[in-house]
Image: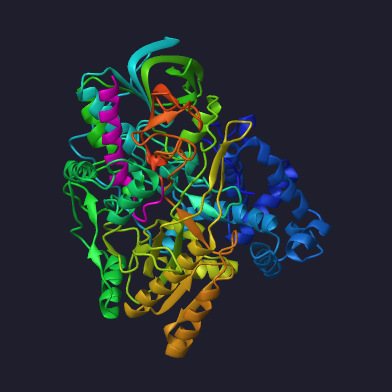
C-alpha cells in the first residue's frame, strides 16, 4: 500500500495539501504520538502535506480508509487486536496495538503501518528551517546532534537556469531529458562536439550557494518525491536524486567501476558489444580520472569498524575511492556539497557543457516524446510546476536523449506511446540489508566521510547466493528514525538516544529479481519488486557477515533491522551470539518484515542485442518494436532517440553504479556523433 509518487508542489495551506477530514487528522495525530512522543498534531499536518505532494491521488483513498478503520472499534480490532478506537487507547495500549500492526500477518495492513511509521518517524527527527513540531530540535539535542553549516566555496558552480521567456516552442539540435550522471556526461560531450544542447530537469537548480543545510529541507528540495519514493507495497524505501545533477548531487561519492565478471556477462549473455573489451575499460579509466577518484583520506569510526572487524576475521577490507577534490569530510554529502569538493555532474559535466554553450532548464518536466513515422522530433514538457506557474512547452530537436533514471525513463517512454514489451521490465534495485552495531565510544554516523571503507570478501556469488559488498550506511537522524525497527515507543526512543554510538553497515546485493515500473493513470510511477529466494539467501548471508564484523570490531550490541528485529548483546555471551547468527538464517524478507533500502535503480530500458528482450540496442538507441522486419537495416530503431542512464544496464552491478553510468554515457555520446 505504499504510494506511487511523483514530484509536485502544493503550498501547505492549499486545498491540494489537505486531503483528510478533521476526524482523520485526529487519528493521524494519535498515530504520530503513538510512534514518537510529542507534537503529534503538528507532525500529522506535515505528513498530510507530504502525502498530498508526492502520493498518487488514486491511493489517497486507501490511506483514508486505514485512518477510518482506526477510528472504529471493529476496524481497530482487525488491525491491532483492540476493540476500541485507536485514539481512545492509553499509552501502553497504543504500544501493544502498534506492535501488532507493524507485524500484522496480512501484508496489505502491514504495508499501511509501514507507510505511517516511516513517514511520522522521519518527520519527528529530521531538522528543517521550519521544524515539523516544536520538539524536533529538543529530540535532536537529546541525541547530541549539533551540526554546523559548512562554509560555501569561493568558486561556486557557474550555472544559471536558461530563461525561455514566454516562448511556447523551442528548437535545438539535442534535447537531453534528465541531468544526472548520464545526462550530464552526454551533454558535456555533445556540446564539446559543437552540438546545440538543451538539458531539461524536472527538479530545481541548486548550487553550493543555495544547497540546504538541514536534513528535511534537503530531502524536500533535492530528492525524487521528497525522499518518499518506495515500492508499491512500501517494502523498499528508494532514494534517488531529483535535482540538477541528479544522484551525483546527493550521493556519497563512492566511485567503484563495474566488476570484470559483470562486464563479461553483459557482452557474453546480452550482446553488449565491447563491454568486456579495451574500449570500455578505457572509458572507465577516463571516467575515474575525470572525476578525480582517489582513496578516502579520513576513515571515520563507522568505517574504521569495518576495517577492524574484517581484519580480525581475516577478511578483505579496503578504502573506498571517491570522486572528490580537497574535502573537509563534513558529513553532509546527502545535502549537496557546499564546499565544492564533490566532482558531481553539476560541478563537472554540466558546468563544462555550459562553457561549450549548452543550456540548462530546471523545473521542466517532459510529459511525452514527439515521435512521428519512426523518428524522434522532440518533446512536450511542462515548465514551472515547482514555481507554481505551470505551462506547456514544445521542444523540437533533431536528437533526443532520455536520461531520467531507471524510475522515470520507462514512464516517459510509456506515456509517449512506445509499446516495446520490455519497457519498464527487468528493474534491479540492489536491495540492501542493514545491521546496526552499537559501540561504547561515539561513532556519529553523520560526521566525516560518508563511505570510506568496504569489504569485498563476498562479492563473488556461489551456488546458493548472490554476491555482495559490505559498506557503511551513513545517515542523519531522520533517516535513522525511519530505518531502525519499531517495537515500542520507549524502545525506539532508546535506540535513537544511542544514535551517536551506532555504526550502521549495509550490504549491496547483486539482485536477480525483475521488478517493474509503470505509469499510473495520473502519471505517477508505480514500482513493483520482489526479491527472489536466491536474493534473499544473499541478504541473509550478508546479515550474518555484517554481524560478525560488528562483533569482531567490538560492538556491545547488534541489531538486524526486521519486524520483529533480531539482536544480540555482548553481555549475553558467545553462545548467545551463535544462536543469534543461526536465527538470521530464518530472517524474513517478506514485504515489510525485514528493513530494506535501495539507492541504486537499473535496468528498465536495458540495452542488448536481442530485440525482444532489450529495449535499446547495445549503443543506447531505442527500439520501436520487439519484432523488427528481417531486412530492416535499423533493427526497428526509432531514429534520433537514445537512452543514457542506469536503465540501460542489462543486469545489476553489485557495486555503486555512478562510474558505470558515466562510462556507458560516453559510449552513447560517441554513438550519437557517429550517427549524425
Nearer-the-camera pick, 427 or 69: 427
Nearer-the-camera pick, 262 or 205: 262
Position of 586 compared to 436: left or right?
right
Give the quadrant of residue 75.
bottom right
User: Main SS of the magenta segment?
Assistant: helix
Give the quadrant of residue 270.
top left
Position of 52 compared to 655: left or right?
right
Q: Residue 144: x percent and y percent?
A: 38, 63
Point 51% across, 52% down: residue: 237
- Colour mapping: rainbow
Residue occupying the far front of the picture? 631
Point 36% across, 34% down: residue: 644
Position of 421 compared to 290: left or right?
right
Q: Which residues are magenta?
A: 651-676
State whether residue 573 is above or below residue 335: below
Q: Residue 83: x percent and y percent?
A: 82, 64
Q: Residue 597: x percent and y percent?
A: 47, 56
Nearer-the-camera pick, 577 or 182: 182
Amino acid at each position: 500500500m505504499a504510494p506511487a509518487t511523483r514530484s509536485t508542489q502544493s503550498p501547505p495551506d492549499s486545498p491540494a495539501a489537505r486531503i483528510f477530514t478533521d476526524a482523520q487528522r485526529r487519528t493521524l495525530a494519535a498515530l504520530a504520538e503513538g510512534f514518537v512522543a510529542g507534537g503529534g498534531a503538528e507532525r500529522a499536518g506535515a505528513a498530510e502535506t507530504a502525502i498530498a505532494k508526492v502520493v498518487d491521488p488514486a491511493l489517497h483513498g486507501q490511506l483514508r480508509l486505514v485512518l477510518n478503520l482506526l477510528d472504529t472499534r471493529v476496524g481497530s480490532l482487525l488491525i491491532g487486536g483492540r476493540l476500541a478506537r485507536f485514539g481512545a487507547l492509553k499509552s501502553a495500549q497504543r504500544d501493544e496495538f502498534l506492535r501488532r500492526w507493524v507485524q500484522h500477518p496480512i501484508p496489505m495492513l502491514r504495508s499501511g503501518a509501514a507507510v505511517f511509521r516511516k513517514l511520522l518517524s522521519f518527520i519527528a527527527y529530521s531538522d528543517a528551517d521550519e521544524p515539523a513540531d516544536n520538539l524536533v530540535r529538543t529530540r535532536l539535542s537529546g541525541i547530541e546532534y549539533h551540526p554546523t553549516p559548512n562554509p560555501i566555496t569561493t568558486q561556486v558552480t557557474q550555472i544559471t537556469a536558461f530563461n525561455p521567456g514566454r516562448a511556447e516552442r523551442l528548437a535545438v539540435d539535442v534535447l537531453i531529458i534528465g541531468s544526472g550522471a548520464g545526462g550530464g556526461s552526454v551533454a558535456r560531450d555533445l556540446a564539446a562536439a559543437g552540438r546545440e544542447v538543451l538539458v531539461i530537469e524536472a527538479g530545481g537548480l541548486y548550487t553550493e550557494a543555495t544547497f540546504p543545510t538541514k536534513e528535511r529541507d534537503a530531502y524536500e528540495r533535492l530528492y525524487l518525491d521528497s525522499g518518499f519514493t518506495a515500492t508499491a507495497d512500501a517494502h523498499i524505501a528508494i532514494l534517488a536524486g531529483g535535482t540538477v545533477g541528479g544522484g551525483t548531487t546527493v550521493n556519497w561519492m563512492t566511485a567503484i567501476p563495474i566488476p570484470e565478471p559483470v562486464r563479461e556477462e553483459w557482452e557474453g549473455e546480452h550482446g553488449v558489444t565491447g563491454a568486456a573489451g579495451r574500449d570500455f575499460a578505457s572509458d572507465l579509466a577516463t571516467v575515474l580520472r575525470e572525476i578525480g577518484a582517489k582513496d578516502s583520506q579520513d576513515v571515520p569510526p563507522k568505517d574504521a569498524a569495518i576495517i577492524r572487524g574484517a581484519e580480525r576475521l581475516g577478511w578483505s577490507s579496503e578504502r573506498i575511492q571517491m570522486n572528490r577534490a580537497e574535502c573537509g569530510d563534513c558529513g553532509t554529502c546527502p545535502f549537496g556539497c557546499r564546499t565544492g569538493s564533490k566532482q558531481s555532474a553539476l560541478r563537472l559535466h554540466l558546468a563544462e557543457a555550459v562553457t561549450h554553450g549548452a543550456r540548462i532548464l530546471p523545473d521542466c518536466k517532459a510529459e511525452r516524446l514527439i515521435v512521428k513515422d519512426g523518428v524522434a522530433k522532440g518533446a512536450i514538457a511542462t515548465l514551472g510546476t515547482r514555481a507554481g506557474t505551470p505551462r506547456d512547452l514544445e521542444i523540437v530537436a533533431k536528437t533526443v536523449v532520455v536520461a531520467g533514471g531507471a524510475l522515470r525513463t520507462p514512464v516517459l517512454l510509456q506515456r509517449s506511446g512506445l509499446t516495446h514489451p520490455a519497457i519498464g521490465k527487468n528493474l534491479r534495485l540492489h536491495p540492501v540489508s542493514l545491521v546496526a552495531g552499537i559501540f561504547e565510544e561515539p561513532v556519529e554516523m553523520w560526521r566525516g566521510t560518508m563511505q570510506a571503507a568496504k569489504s569485498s570478501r563476498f562479492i563473488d556469488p556461489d551456488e546458493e547466493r548472490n554476491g555482495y559488498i559490505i559498506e557503511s550506511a551513513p545517515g542523519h537522524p531522520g533517516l535513522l528514525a525511519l530505518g531502525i525497527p519499531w517495537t515500542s515507543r520507549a524502545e525506539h526512543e532508546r535506540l535513537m538516544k544511542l544514535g551517536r554510538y551506532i555504526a550502521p553497515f549495509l550490504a549491496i546485493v547483486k539482485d536477480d529479481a525483475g521488478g517493474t515500473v509503470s505509469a499510473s493513470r495520473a502519471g505517477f510511477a508505480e514500482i513493483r519488486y520482489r526479491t527472489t529466494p536466491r536474493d534473499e539467501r544473499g541478504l541473509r548471508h550478508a546479515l550474518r557477515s555484517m554481524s560478525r564484523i560488528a562483533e569482531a570490531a567490538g560492538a556491545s550490541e547488534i541489531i538486524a533491522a526486521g519486524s520483529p528485529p533480531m539482536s544480540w548483546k555482548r553481555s549475553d555471551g558467545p553462545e548467545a551470539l551463535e544462536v543469534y547468527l543461526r536465527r538470521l538464517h530464518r530472517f524474513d524478507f517478506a514485504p515489510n518484515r525485514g528493513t530494506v533500502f535501495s539507492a541504486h535503480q537499473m535496468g528498465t530500458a536495458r540495452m542488448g542485442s536481442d530485440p525482444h528482450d532489450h529495449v535499446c540496442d547495445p549503443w543506447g538507441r531505442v527500439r520501436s518494436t520487439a519484432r523488427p522486419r528481417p531486412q530492416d537495416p535499423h533493427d526497428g530503431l526509432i531514429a534520433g532517440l537514445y537512452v543514457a542512464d542506469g536503465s540501460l544496464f542489462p543486469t545489476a552491478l553489485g557495486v555503486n553504479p555512478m562510474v558505470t553510468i558515466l562510462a556507458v554515457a560516453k559510449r552513447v555520446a560517441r554513438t550519437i556523433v557517429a550517427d549524425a
